[in-house]
Amino acid sequence: MDYVRIGTVKDLGSTKIKSYKIFGRIIAVLKKADGSYEAIEAACKHQGADLTTGERKGWTVTCPRHGWKYDLETGHCLNHDSLPLKKYNLKIDGEDIHVSLQPIEE
Ligand code: FES
């Protein structure tokens, strides 16, 4: 599986989330309470807004455009019938974050 470096763990800061644009996709990296990291698609399934710019409560985020809500831990949309957000494999090497080019097949 091919990985690409997208940033460093310092990018996440106190918000514990950061989105990156990579090859036309928006991927968010989350730092969870247990210190682990996850990478997930962060483009809204409705019209593609960056979900990391929406209001967040815990890992539930509301899209800033039209209010679709997502659980960023599971990828599921909470208020519309929608495909889930795709997850990506992630590796931490020192402070560098690398994500897989292909999403995890579920
Ligand atoms: S773009 Fe996200 S709800 Fe419309």
Image (spheres, helix red, strand yellow):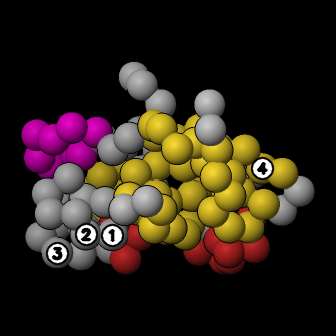
Q: Out of 79 and 87, give the one closest to the viewer.
A: 87
Image x and y of residue 75, in percent: 36, 43
- The residues colored magenta run 77-84
Of tags 3 and 2, which is closer to the observer?
A: 2
- x and y percentages locating residue 67 in the rendered image: 16, 67
Q: Amino acid at mark 3?
A: Arg
How crowded is the residue under tag 4: few (<14 C-alpha within 10 Å), some, or many (20+)?
Answer: some
Mark 2 CB lies closer than 8 A to ligand 1: yes
Total numbered labels placed on residues in the image: 4
- Under tag 2, what secondary structure? loop
Magenta includes 83? yes
Q: Is residue 68 magenta?
A: no
Which disc number belongs to residue 50?
1
104 in relation to 47, above or below: above
Residue beneath label 2, please? 49
Residue ID at (62%, 38%) = 2
Residue type, label 4: Ile
- In the image, what residue occupies the spot 10% across and 40% down? 81
Is ligand 1 within 8 Å of the beta carbon of the residue shown at mark 3? yes
Dominant secondary-structure state across the stretch colored magenta: loop
User: Which badge, 4 or 2, is on the more N-terminal residue?
Assistant: 2
Give the alpha-carbon distance from disc 1 to disc 4, as whole Å: 23 Å
**In the image, what residue type sits under mark 2?**
Ala
Front residue of 90/4: it is 4
- Mark 4 and mark 2: span between their CA atoms? 27 Å
User: Which quarter of the figure is the N terminus placed in?
Assistant: top right
In front of the other: 23 or 63 = 23
- Check residue 79 in the rendering and tell me which mark sits there, or answer none: none
